[in-house]
């Protein structure tokens, strides 16, 4: 990255802050390399370097952000060329960064929340002998995630895409001495690879039709209608597959729950706030493609809606605190997907929800981490209860996150989620009704299970065992939680007030002005109905789990079929097993048999043949020199006889 | 041969004398060559091949090649075949081939192929349209070696150089191939002598083989003053091969001659000897008397040489001690000491063995 | 009686030599068989030389003899070293060439 040459597609010269954006990727990457290569020597100061790297990235990003603010909205997009990466024939790919409103939003989220979580981890991982390695991986993740959102082409994005997959794998399996954790890491990795296939296919189709992979190049040609709708639909579906893999959307959702095996800060950063939203980023970034293909957009909507409900239902039955949060993450990303599929306006709200979600979900996870810290890493909520009095600060921060995710005004979730629900009602025909009602219902269920979680942990009777001594976490953990809680409270409102959707418009509406349309129901009706549902859900949870009178059994009580199914993640693993693993294994077995019997058989057969022939021929090689002499003489006689016969 | 269309003039065919030479020498050559196939002993074969070579030299001369005829004799008979014989000696002159064939059917294959080869070659010779001899008189100009030399050095100098190189390489190669690296320190005469003294083995050289004036063949053991065979006098190679001539037949005429001599020193030669097939008996007999004679030139040496019989030795030696005429003792000593030193060797000396009980007095008398 | 007689004699000798190589096991005797074959060839050379009236055949025979001398030196050296290691000059006591 030494020779940086600035190729600016935007007419304007890039301000200094923007031109230094490559540092945002380079600093955490270098830090990760140092931490990994220095080995034990870096144990003493490794975490400090990790935090510093992340913070430095945030500083650079903030600088670029303010530099960007000084520009007119249309001139806020920059293309920062780094180096010629692939040069071949008519294909010439320059690795570069694309800095615009969308990517800078992500960069700020990733670096800010990332830095907070880095700080939190210093305390959370303080007793782990491998803390340095943990920070190395976290830095690696930050670098890869930033490369993902900053890349100016699908290929650069893909590098970051794989990088975060790797970091995710390493961090889920961070305690890989436990077999089930290692298996969880593998599961996440494999599920992500399925999505990667979609990404690769999308890139191949793009390359075949557009001969370029840069965002600008591809979108330009999409605008110019050089590709048929079928091609665009194919690209859109393939990208959706990729997004499903990365964002744990239906049908590739199964890995997220198991991914909670990783340390809680990892769950907060990677599996709640940032990496899992990469799919949403991809869909929003590819908005110009989706806008031209109704089929793919509908697929996005359906996937979003299904996941939204799926996550919500699973969340209702989970007793494992982190898994319940994971299910909620899935569900919330379902909302974002749904919004992203709704078009330019929805996409803006998707990103907005993504940002608010990043804050409140990270806060919730960090709170969960704090609870686990207090409860000797226990995660079973049935063993909690009444913690609100013991851990006041955690209780407050988690309450902020809880109210935010519920969408209670004026907490931040309300501003983004309510907008998404409103947008879901926009449209014609059956679609607004279906997706709108699903989104609204989802909000109600979300209210129930999040309230259940909150009440089970902090209210009701104390159900922990005698050897537990819950205590508040050290400041190094509570301060980040508090900051995130503040974000959970007001970020949504702020974003709404400063007109975030408007700010994003140059990106989301790159494909063209989106027509403002009215929902099929009046906006106040939607808002009120949603709030009523949310309050109903919360009230139900209070009655069942929060009130002093509520009896929460320590062991999961027998339940009806639906609850059982939800506890089993709606049989996602069974389904995977039946529909994917077993047929796959059968195919592999078949191929192995074919390979063993036919291919190897042929090879061995040839070997056997040669051996047999050789064995037979070796009998001629008696080793007796006189036999050889006899053969020679026989040959001589034969030749002489032939010569004579010809000659005569 | 009749089938060949002889167009040649009479002068070009063989003269009568040449035909005579051809048939006589040719037959000898072929007959001698057949020894290669049928003679068991390598030496015989070598000699037969020499005959072949010399015969071929005759034929060469008859073919107007006197120079090559001489070279044939010098090189083949004189050098190559001598080398063969030399190697045969080195390897074992009496090694004879077993004619039992080890490779199944090899003899029949050989016979068949030989026959086939003969048919092919003779067929070719017969079929070839060969003119008669042109003769070499003009080319030779009366001096064949000079003519050969002229052509050799005029037309084939390069070939000559190359063959010279080849010869040198071959000589060096032979040296290299038969050379063995010395793995231990060289044992020199001085070392051997020192070793002999250290181990109490006989220091002087063993007696030469052969009974002088009678049988001086290398495989005949010397006889000590008692008329006993000194088996150590025969070269160890021959002993190892079991090629030492027996003294059986020898004793007949040997003893009368030997006895007087022994008698002179011993006094009582005890003639009962020639008991036909048991020469050991008669050899042993004089020995019984011998102790008195040449008892103890080296009484101290004996125990070291042979631990077993010392008791007998001393007992036998005692009476002998006073009478110790210097001369015969000296003569006898060389023979005795080795005998005592290597009691297990006399495998070939059957006569000496049959009477182990007699050995003790024998050993005793030696002292 | 012309060249043919000599050729036939040479053929007979050559055959005897070749057969010797095939049927005898003593390396020295086999080697003598080879020498006999060379001599047979020499005889044919000389006969042809006389037939054509040129000396080139004699020179060929001469060179054959020289080469034969070299060959004998090396061959016998081989036999001697063979005998040293295996105490035998039989070529097929063991089928060594097989290993």
Image (cartoon, coloured by chain):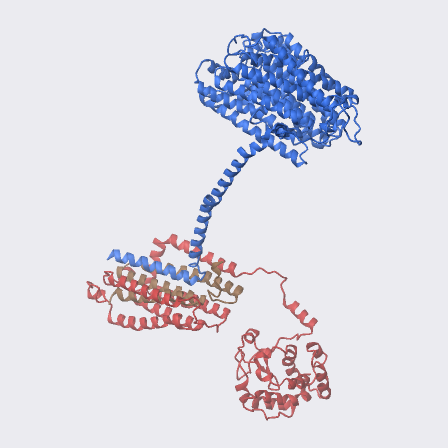
Chain colours: A blue, B red, C brown
- Name the residue at the top extreme: A72
User: Position of B130 compared to B363: left or right?
Assistant: left
Q: Position of residue B147 (x, y in %)?
A: 32, 59
A246 or B158: which is nearer to us? A246
A527 or A638: which is nearer to us? A527
Residue B141 in view of the camera: no
User: Position of B314 compared to A187: left or right?
Assistant: right
Q: Residue A246 is drawn in which quadrant?
A: top right
The N terminus of chain B: image quadrant: bottom left
- Residue located 52% across and 65% down the image: C86
Q: Residue B66 is drawn in which quadrant?
A: bottom left
Q: Position of residue C95 (x, y in %)?
A: 47, 62
* Relative to C7, residue A614 above or below: above
A226 or B337: which is nearer to us? A226
User: Position of C68 compared to B255: left or right?
Assistant: left
Q: Position of residue A372 (x, y in %)?
A: 73, 27
- Residue located 78% across and 22% down the image: A391
Q: Position of residue A181 (x, y in %)?
A: 66, 33
The C terminus of chain B: image quadrant: bottom right
- Residue located 52% across and 67% down the image: C87
Residue A204 in view of the camera: yes
A382 or A192: which is nearer to us? A382
* Relative to A190, residue B261 above or below: below
How many numbered tags mark residues here?
0
Q: Residue A503 is drawn in which quadrant?
A: top right
* Relative to B242, residue A474 above or below: above
């Amino acid at each position: 990255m030494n020779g940086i040459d600035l190729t600016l597609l935007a007419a304007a010269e890039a301000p200094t802050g923007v031109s230094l954006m490559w540092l945002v990727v380079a600093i955490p990457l270098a830090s990760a390399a140092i931490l990994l290569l220095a080995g034990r020597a870096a144990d003493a100061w490794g975490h400090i370097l990790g935090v510093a790297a992340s913070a430095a990235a945030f500083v650079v990003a903030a600088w670029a952000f303010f530099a960007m603010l000084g520009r007119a909205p249309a001139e806020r997009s920059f293309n920062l060329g780094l180096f010629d990466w692939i040069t071949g024939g008519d294909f010439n790919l320059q690795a570069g960064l694309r800095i615009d409103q969308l990517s800078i939003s992500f960069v700020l989220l990733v670096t800010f929340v990332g830095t907070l979580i880095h700080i939190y981890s210093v305390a959370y991982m303080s007793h782990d002998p491998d803390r340095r390695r943990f920070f190395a991986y976290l830095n690696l993740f930050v670098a890869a995630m930033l490369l993902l959102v900053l890349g100016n082409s699908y290929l650069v994005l893909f590098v970051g895409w794989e990088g975060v997959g790797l970091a995710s794998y390493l961090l889920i399996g961070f305690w890989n001495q436990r077999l089930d954790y290692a298996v969880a890491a593998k599961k996440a990795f494999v599920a992500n690879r399925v999505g990667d296939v979609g990404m690769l296919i999308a890139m191949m189709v793009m390359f075949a039709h557009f001969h370029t992979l840069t965002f600008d190049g591809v979108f330009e040609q999409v605008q110019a209608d050089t590709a048929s709708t079928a091609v665009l639909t194919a690209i859109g579906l393939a990208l959706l597959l990729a997004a499903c893999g990365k964002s744990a959307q239906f049908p590739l959702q199964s890995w997220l729950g198991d991914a909670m095996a990783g340390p809680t800060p990892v769950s907060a950063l990677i599996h709640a706030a940032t990496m899992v939203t990469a799919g949403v980023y991809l869909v929003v970034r590819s908005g110009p493609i989706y806008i031209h293909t109704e089929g793919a957009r509908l697929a996005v909507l359906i996937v979003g809606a299904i996941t939204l409900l799926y996550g919500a239902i699973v969340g209702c039955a989970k007793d494992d605190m982190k898994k319940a949060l994971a299910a909620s993450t899935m569900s919330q990303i379902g909302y974002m997907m749904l919004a992203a599929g709704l078009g330019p306006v929805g996409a803006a709200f998707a990103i907005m929800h993504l940002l608010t979600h990043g804050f409140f979900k990270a806060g919730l996870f960090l709170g969960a981490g704090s609870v686990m810290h207090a409860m000797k890493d226990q995660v079973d909520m049935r063993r909690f209860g009444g913690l609100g009095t013991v851990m006041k600060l955690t209780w407050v921060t988690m309450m902020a996150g809880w109210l935010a995710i519920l969408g209670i005004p004026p907490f931040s979730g309300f501003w983004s989620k309510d907008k998404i629900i409103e947008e879901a009602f926009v449209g014609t025909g059956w679609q607004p009704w279906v997706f709108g009602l699903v989104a609204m219902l989802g909000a109600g269920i979300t209210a129930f299970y999040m309230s259940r979680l909150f009440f089970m942990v902090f209210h009701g009777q104390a159900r922990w065992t005698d050897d537990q001594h819950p205590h508040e976490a050290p400041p190094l953990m509570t301060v980040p939680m508090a900051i995130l809680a503040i974000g959970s409270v007001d970020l949504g409102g702020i974003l709404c007030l400063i007109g975030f959707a408007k700010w994003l418009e140059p990106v989301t509406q790159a494909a063209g002005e989106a027509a403002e349309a009215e929902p099929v129901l009046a906006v106040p009706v939607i808002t009120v109905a949603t709030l009523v549902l949310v309050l109903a859900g919360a009230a139900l949870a209070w009655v069942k789990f929060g009130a002093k009178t509520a009896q929460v059994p320590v062991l999961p009580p027998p339940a009806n079929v639906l609850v059982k199914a939800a506890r089993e993640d709606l049989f996602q693993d069974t389904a995977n097993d039946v529909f994917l693993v077993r047929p796959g294994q059968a195919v592999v077995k078949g191929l192995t048999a074919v390979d063993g019997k036919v291919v190897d058989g042929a090879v061995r057969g040839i070997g056997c043949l040669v051996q047999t022939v050789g064995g037979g021929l070796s009998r001629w090689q008696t080793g007796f020199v006189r036999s050889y002499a006899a053969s020679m003489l026989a040959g001589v006689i034969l030749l002489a006889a032939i010569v004579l016969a010809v000659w005569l | 041969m009749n089938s060949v269309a002889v167009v040649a003039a009479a002068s070009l065919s063989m003269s009568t004398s040449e035909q005579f030479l051809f048939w006589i020498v040719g037959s000898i050559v072929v007959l001698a060559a057949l020894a290669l196939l049928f003679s068991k002993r390598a030496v015989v074969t070598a000699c037969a091949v020499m005959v072949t070579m010399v015969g071929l030299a005759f034929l060469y001369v008859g073919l107007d090649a006197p120079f090559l005829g001489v070279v044939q004799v010098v090189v083949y008979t004189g050098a190559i075949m001598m080398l063969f014989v030399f190697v045969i000696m080195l390897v074992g002159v009496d090694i004879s081939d077993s004619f039992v064939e080890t490779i199944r059917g090899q003899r029949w294959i050989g016979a068949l192929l030989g026959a086939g080869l003969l048919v092919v070659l003779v067929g070719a010779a017969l079929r070839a349209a060969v003119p008669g001899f042109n003769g070499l008189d003009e080319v030779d100009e009366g001096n064949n070696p000079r003519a050969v030399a002229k052509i050799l050095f005029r037309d084939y100098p390069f070939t000559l150089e190359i063959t010279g190189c080849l010869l040198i390489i071959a000589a060096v190669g032979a040296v290299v191939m038969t050379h063995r690296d010395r793995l231990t320190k060289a044992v020199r005469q001085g070392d051997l002598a020192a070793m002999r003294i250290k181990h109490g083995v006989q220091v002087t050289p063993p007696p030469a083989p052969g009974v002088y004036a009678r049988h001086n063949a290398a495989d005949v053991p010397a006889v000590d003053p008692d008329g006993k065979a000194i088996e150590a006098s025969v070269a160890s190679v021959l002993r190892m091969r079991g090629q030492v001539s027996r003294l059986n037949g020898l004793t007949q005429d040997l003893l009368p001659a030997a006895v007087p001599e022994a008698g002179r020193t011993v006094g009582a030669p005890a003639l009962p000897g020639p008991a036909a097939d048991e020469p050991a008996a008669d050899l042993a007999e004089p020995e019984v008397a011998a102790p008195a004679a040449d008892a103890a030139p080296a009484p101290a040496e004996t125990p070291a040489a042979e631990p077993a019989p010392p008791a007998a030795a001393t007992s036998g030696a005692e009476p002998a001690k006073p009478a110790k005429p210097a001369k015969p003792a000296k003569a006898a000593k060389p023979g005795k000491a080795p005998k005592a030193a290597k009691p297990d060797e006399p495998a070939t000396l059957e006569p000496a063995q049959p009477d182990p009980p007699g050995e003790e007095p024998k050993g005793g008398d030696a002292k | 009686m012309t060249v043919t007689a000599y050729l036939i004699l040479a053929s007979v000798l050559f055959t005897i030599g070749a057969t010797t190589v095939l049927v005898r096991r003593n390396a020295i005797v086999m080697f003598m068989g080879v020498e006999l074959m060379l001599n047979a060839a020499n005889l044919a050379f000389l006969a042809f030389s006389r037939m054509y009236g040129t000396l080139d055949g004699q020179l060929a025979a001469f060179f054959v003899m020289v080469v034969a001398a070299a060959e004998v030196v090396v061959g016998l050296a081989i036999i001697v070293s063979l005998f040293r290691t295996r105490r035998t000059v039989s070529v097929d006591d063991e089928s060594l060439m097989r290993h």
